[in-house]
Image (tube, rainbow, N blue to C red):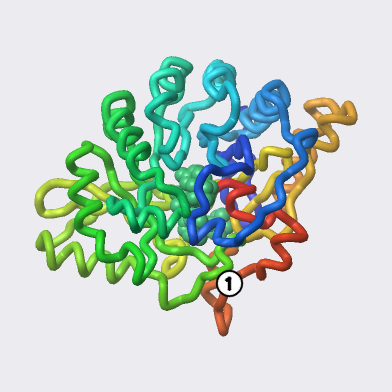
């Protein structure tokens, strides 16, 4: 199986598959608006189409698949899709990112179907803050999902977006909770991606600040191993607990980015910040052969020059990347549509 590289020699090895644009939370850094339009149901790829496209991407070198959304656990019969993906030769890593609300009920079935790894997003341990952050009173169900994840996917990951003035005061409590759960916590810097219409630079808690808080609490921090293309830099606290920081905003890692994203309706995006994507649903539904689609995908990746987060870092007067009015016109620009 070949591996294709883009204009900067970055291989196509990781694919995020968004299985739905729907979500049961309204996180203030992702879906802060009052109303959203949704992708038309008839455009959503069925399992057969998702599996066919995944096979095709694997034939071009993709080795890691992550199911995402929206909230992927809202997709009906998700374990059946996982089982079909797990059967594809060549996938080395099959993972999923969830907000955890529905996880307690589904973790066992997902594991049995062949899901290898899970990441749960968790930003707060305080019920009132959870409601403020997500507009839903779902912390109890998320906590039950976390306990289930610790049992069914030991060593799972927890992703936390810190927003200054909202949950940054919980940094140490979240580290302690991850330790209790045997999970590896990763702090993600708040990004100005599409969807984050309320983003301001002041709200970003930077990697430097996070490390400084951790050093004050735990003493000197050592670097830990991480793979060169992994978004998180890993660190080891003096007590032996490993954690990661994804510094997408202050220290972008575009130079080694091997990730692309397929939306639930079959649009392929080469960067979180890309303003246009490639429609693969069209050719798929009008009878194109696998070879035809593979050729389009290959050509598109070979021309890829995206370095979205680096471009954003260099831009002056930085505010929200996409205004709410533009998101309304084009939901594909939303983080919850293209998958985080
Ligand atoms: N709904 C699932 C979840 O929340 O885990 C999966 C989809 S969500 C879009 C994937 C990840 O994107 C989550 O960990 C979320 O915290 C992250 N995310 C969304 N908006 C973000 C932003 N503005 N900055 C940084 N991370 C963001
Ligand atoms: Fe929050 Fe994920 Fe839903 Fe976005 S898609 S609102 S990050 S739970
Ligand atoms: Fe990759 Fe784009 Fe993110 Fe940079 S901004 S790491 S190119 S997805």
Give the image location of residue 163, x and y in percent: 39, 66
Image: 307 above or below 288: below
Q: Quadrant of the N terminus?
A: top right
Q: Is residue 37 visible?
A: yes
Q: Is residue 233 visible?
A: no
Give the image location of residue 120, x and y in percent: 39, 41
Neighbourhood count class around disc 1 (C-alpha, 10 Å): few under 14, some 14–19, many 20 upward: some
Extreme bottom residue here?
Answer: 317
Which quarter of the figure has residue 158?
top left
Task: Identify the secondary structure beneath mark 1.
Answer: loop
Q: Which residue is mark 1?
A: 320
Question: How many marks overall?
Answer: 1
Q: Residue at x 57, y 46 (%)?
A: 339
From the viewer's side, name the closer residue of 150 and 4. Answer: 150
Give the image location of residue 102, x and y in percent: 44, 32
Which quarter of the figure has residue 312?
bottom right
Image: 313 above or below 99: below
Q: Residue at x 47, y 27 (%)?
A: 92
From the viewer's side, name the closer residue of 303 and 282. Answer: 282
Q: Is mark 1 within 8 Å of ligand 1?
A: no
Q: Residue at x 46, y 39 (%)?
A: 97
Task: Please indicate whether residue 24 sits to the left or right of residue 303 in the image.
Answer: left
Q: Residue at x 26, y 50 (%)?
A: 243
Task: Please indicate whether residue 124 sits to the left or right of residue 77 in the image.
Answer: left
From the viewer's side, name the closer residue of 222 and 17. Answer: 17
């Amino acid at each position: 199986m070949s591996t294709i590289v883009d204009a900067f020699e970055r291989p196509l090895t990781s694919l995020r598959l968004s299985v739905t644009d729907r979500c049961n939370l309204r996180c203030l850094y992702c879906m802060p608006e009052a109303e959203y339009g949704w992708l038309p149901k008839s455009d959503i790829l069925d399992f057969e189409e998702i599996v066919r496209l995944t096979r095709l991407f694997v034939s071009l070198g993709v080795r890691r698949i992550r199911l995402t959304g929206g909230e992927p656990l809202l997709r009906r019969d998700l374990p059946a899709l996982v089982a079909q993906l797990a059967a594809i030769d060549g996938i080395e890593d099959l993972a999923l990112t969830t907000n955890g609300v529905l996880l307690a009920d589904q973790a066992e079935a997902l594991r049995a179907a062949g899901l290898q790894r899970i990441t749960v997003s968790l930003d707060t341990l305080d019920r009132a803050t959870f409601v403020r952050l997500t507009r839903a009173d779902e912390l109890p169900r998320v906590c039950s999902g976390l306990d289930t994840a610790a049992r069914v996917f030991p060593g799972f990951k927890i992703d936390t977006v810190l927003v200054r003035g909202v949950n940054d005061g919980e940094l140490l409590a979240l580290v302690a909770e991850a330790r209790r759960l045997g999970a590896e916590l990763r702090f993600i810097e708040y990004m100005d991606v599409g969807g984050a219409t309320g983003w301001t630079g002041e709200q970003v808690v930077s990697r430097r600040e996070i490390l400084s808080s951790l050093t004050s609490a735990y003493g000197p921090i050592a670097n830990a191993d991480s793979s060169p293309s992994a978004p998180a830099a890993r660190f080891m606290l003096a007590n032996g607990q490993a954690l990661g920081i994804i510094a997408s905003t202050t220290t972008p890692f575009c130079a080694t980015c091997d990730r692309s994203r397929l939306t639930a309706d079959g649009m392929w995006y080469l960067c979180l910040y890309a303003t246009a994507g490639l429609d693969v649903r069209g050719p798929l539904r009008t009878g194109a052969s696998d070879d035809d689609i593979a050729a389009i995908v290959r050509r598109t990746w070979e021309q890829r020059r995206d370095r979205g987060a680096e471009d954003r870092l260099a831009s002056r007067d930085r505010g929200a990347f996409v205004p709410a009015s533009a998101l309304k016109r084009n939901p594909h620009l939303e983080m919850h549509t293209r998958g985080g």
